[in-house]
Image: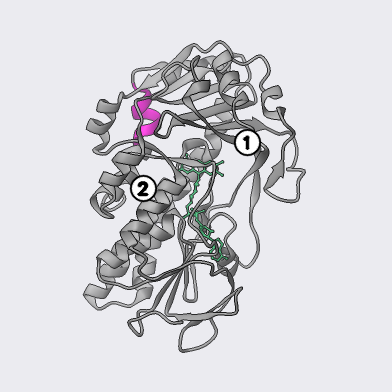
Amino acid sequence: MTGVNSGRRIAIVGAGIGGLTLAVELRRRGLEPQVYEQTDELREVGAAVALSANATRFLRDRTGIGEGLAHKAADVDGLVFRDGRDGRVIGRVLSREEYRARCGAPYYGIHRADLQQLLAGALDGAGLHLGKRLLSVDDTGTAGAVLHFADGDRAEADLVLGADGARSLLRREVVGYDDARFSGCYGWRGIVGPDHLDLLPDPEAIQFWMGPGGHLLHYPIGSGDQNFLLVKRLKGPWPEQAWLAPSAPGEHVAAFEGWHPAVLQMIAAAPAGERWGLFHRPPLHQWSRGRVTLLGDAAHALVPHHGQGANQSIEDAIVLADCLTSALARGEDWESARLRYQARRLERTRRVQIASITTADVLHLPDGPRAETRDRRLGAPDAWERHLAWIHEYAADDADAPA
Ligand SMILES: Cc1cc2nc3c(=O)[nH]c(=O)nc-3n(C[C@H](O)[C@H](O)[C@H](O)COP(=O)(O)OP(=O)(O)OC[C@H]3O[C@@H](n4cnc5c(N)ncnc54)[C@H](O)[C@@H]3O)c2cc1C
């Protein structure tokens, strides 16, 4: 199995959010990437993503799935910070209309499977190979890299784009070892229907409920459901073998005893049968080795406290597609395109990675003067400008945009 366009054979490993966005954008611009995905079906049950304007602008204007998104997603109305125990509002920024006016695109909550289906629909099956789990890449030959799959199949490519997520095999090819690090936090995820949300204030907002050593983040995802991520801090290393570990029934509710009734009602309504160890990876100086180049979580796995993992993957995909197609138009080689892509993405993603880590520290402050300072800052009129505008208002396709 080989791609088309000799000398321009592009393999994308992983049909997640970054890989699919990249494939759609490259096809739209006349290239014919082949996408290899390990699962037999594009479906992840029980998970959602919040898509901010720095990504929805591209999904709408480039990939052409804007209408489908507007239909499937919930249109988030404001970002609210609350005290997790008494429920008081600590800060509130930008209504739905203000957000669109400032950022030029919507803020959505959506089922991950819906997003993948929309992107796969835009691809219309072209070059998408399901059930292809990459086992290894042989990049020693002169004729191209050879990808070996678990089913015994092989494929050749001149460029291998690693969009294989936070546990990326291709990152190990580039880095040489597994560099995952436990972030000190773990969490439970759940999706809750409207019948269990009657205590919830601001159901259309994305909300952070903060408290010592933990927080709840939730947002609407369409059809009245809320997606939540409940995060707790752990003293010491992650004690499990795998990132995902079983959780006893009700363990997540017991861990948040004494929190606001709306919090307890929401989390108690979800089984939350698994605990997620939240891992990230250190920023790299280079995202390529040989014919392999990384994007998305494979390049910069980050913790989800700014809700930016999917959004950064989409930014990467758009910039990488821009760099590859403009290099071709100018008759340049892939190498210059890859260097330009990396130069445009390294600092931006490093900043978002670090902010995602420090956000948890700020959300989890113990009661006292530092928490009071945080609350004053989040409640100040310039809270958006100081803390969030640089993420959401960023236009990754503008080469002159600040990193
Ligand atoms: C608890 C939690 C909550 C989150 N919430 C949000 C949020 O609200 N907003 C947000 O923006 N982000 C969120 N994220 C992060 C987000 O899900 C990821 O950052 C994002 O999906 C990364 O996109 P990606 O394309 O790089 O990788 P993925 O979307 O993970 O896709 C990787 C793909 O590669 C495939 N793959 C892996 N290995 C192989 C292989 N060997 N061969 C073939 N295929 C392979 C996988 O099956 C998968 O389809 C959250 C993450 C977690 C853990």
Instruction: Name the residue furthest front.
Output: 195
Name the mark on residue 403: 2
Q: Are marks 2 and 1 in contact (CB under 8 Å)?
A: no
> How far apart, in angstroms, are the residues tagged by discs 2 and 1?
30 Å
**Residue 385 is covered by the magenta coloring:** yes
Say if residue 34 shows up in the picture. yes
In the rendered image, residue 388, in percent from the top left (x then y), is placed at 38, 32
Left or right: where does residue 366 sit relative to residue 105?
right
What is the crowding at mark 2: few (fewer than 14 residues within 10 Å), some, or many (at least 20)?
some
Q: Is residue 278 above or below residue 100?
A: below
Q: Amino acid at mark 1?
A: Gly
- Region of the chain picked out in magenta, as a range: 382-390
Q: Residue at x 35, y 40 (%)?
A: 72
Does the residue tagged 2 have its C-beta within 8 Å of any atom of ligand 1? no
Residue 43 picture location, percent across and down: 50, 52
The kind of residue tagged 2 is Ala
Using residue 349 as the reference point, say whether residue 26 is left or right of it: left
Q: Callout 1: 10 Å neighbours few (<14), some, many (20+)?
A: many
Mark 1, secondary structure of its residue: strand
Q: Residue at x 51, y 39 (%)?
A: 356
Disc 1 designates what residue? Answer: 187
Residue 375, image x and y in percent?
49, 17
Q: Which one is nearer the viewer's eye here, 389 or 216? A: 216
Does the Cβ of the disc 1 residue fall within 8 Å of ligand 1?
Answer: yes
The answer to whether residue 395 is seen in the rendering is no
Left of 246 or right of it: where is 141? left
